[in-house]
Amino acid sequence: MSMVELQVGDQTIRYDRQATAQIYATTTTGWAERCGCAGCRNYVVQRDEIYPPVFRELLDRLGIDPNKEAEVVLDGPLESGLCHYGGWFFFVGEMLKPSDTWESLPGKQVKMRRLTTRLRSAIHLILHFSSRVLALAQKNFAMSNHNLRSNS
């Protein structure tokens, strides 16, 4: 593995871009496409607006395909009409200096932490994100707290 050191806020990691990119190349879709619930469909159609350029640059630097998140979680509609989402991406690397704080990016929060499991026999880390986006007013997106999996 060819590991490169990177500091993100007060966290320091070593990562292997090539190994991460090879794994993402074998993955056909992200979590949101596979799930298909109303919340995930809402997320997919707004994905390009959800990740700011600086976050996309970080994903690219790490070898992560921004359309293949490991998981997306909808916390439910907010009173403001926005929906709060969280999620994460995996990448090959190791934590050198951890942190319990979120590193703020414009409009988003980013945090990395070490996991105890392995991804294709390589140590991996997880990159968390948090965002608020519109609940699209389309017939196919039933965004109530009681019916997040409805397709009608």
Image (spheres, rainbow, N blue to C red):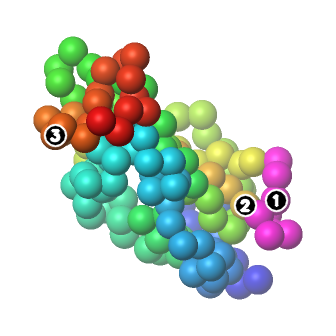
Mark earlier in primary sequence (1, 3) = 1
User: Can you tell which of label 1 and label 3 is closer to the viewer?
Assistant: 3
**Kind of residue at disc 3:** Gln
Residue 49 as seen in the image, left or right of residue 23: left
The span shown in magenta is: 116-123
**Relative vertical location of residue 99 with respect to residue 12 in this rendering, above or below:** above
Judge depth for marks 2 and 3 and give the one in front. Answer: 3
Closer to the chain start, of discs 2 and 3, is 2
Q: Is residue 108 visible?
A: no
Nearer to me, 9 or 22 = 22
Q: Residue at x 48, y 37 (%)?
A: 73
Task: Tell me: 13 left or right of 29.
Answer: right
Q: Which residue is mark 2?
A: 124
Q: Residues within 10 Å of mark 1 (few under 14, many from 20)?
A: few
Local crowd size for mark 2, using a 10 Å CA cut-off: few (<14), some (14–19), many (≥20):
many
Q: Which residue is mark 3?
A: 138
Q: Are marks 2 and 1 in contact (CB under 8 Å)?
A: yes
C-alpha distance separating marks 1 and 3: 39 Å
Rounded to the nearest angstrom, the CA distance separating label 2 from label 1 is: 6 Å
Instruction: Tell me the number on the disc at residue 118.
Output: 1
